[in-house]
Image (spheres, rainbow, N blue to C red):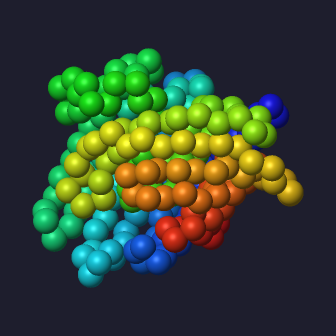
Amino acid sequence: MTPFADPPPFAAWQHRTARHGFEVVHVTAHDGGWRITSCTTAVEDGEPWVVDAVIDVDATWTTRRAHVRGLSPAGERAVVLDADGSGGWRVDGEPDPRLDGCLDVDLESSAVTNTLPVHRMRLAVGEGGPAPAAYVRAVGLGVERLEQTYTRVPHDGPGRSFAYTAPAFDTACDLEVDAAGLVLEYPGIAVRRF
């Protein structure tokens, strides 16, 4: 498979339909991998919230650390997830066996976190597989396991396309990504603006 290009230093998504808001991301090289700094502000079901995150991934795009802060009418909260790169996780310093086997963090507040498994799995057309993730909720920052799959499907154009499923949310859609693996449109969630 042809590798993805390095990510751009900045990207932005407009969140719409499920919620209304905006996400801005800054990506920098960090410790042989990448640091993704994200901020999403949105209104969902009449409730405003803000989620800031700093996510560190290694050279294979496997999550190693995520520091997430949130503010909503429910209050202010922060959570830190540390991963050993082999599927073991600590949440706020405590082991969390529910997340065993997960290699990615997935933020409910973010479109950029779909980039992590897309890069890490390095799928050829027709290949696919499970990509369970440590899932962080937007309001309250609860952490849970999210079962999901990615399958690379044929695509015309410079990017790539993946059939994505997350049965817990009854989600099945195609995610088109650009040459750097960043989602261009997540149906019902977000569309890339920059």
Q: Nearer the viewer, residue 10 or 114?
A: 114
Percent coordinates x, y for residue 84 in the rendering? 38, 19
Q: Taking the image as drawn, is residue 39 in sight? A: no
* Left or right: residue 193 compared with residue 127: left
Assign the N terminus to one quadrant of the image. Answer: top right
Q: Is residue 189 above or below residue 109?
A: below
Name the residue rendered at 13%, 63% in the picture: 75
Q: Nearer the viewer, residue 31 or 88?
A: 88
Percent coordinates x, y for residue 91 in the rendering? 23, 32
Q: Taking the image as drawn, is residue 121 in sight? A: yes
Percent coordinates x, y for residue 58 in the rendering? 53, 26
Q: Which of 72 and 174 is in front in this view?
A: 174
Assign the C terminus to one quadrant of the image. Answer: bottom right
* Left or right: residue 144 compared with residue 131: left
Percent coordinates x, y for residue 182 in the rendering? 64, 52
Name the residue rendered at 32%, 75% in the picture: 44
* Left or right: residue 46 compared with residue 54: left
Q: Is residue 179 above or below residue 188?
A: above
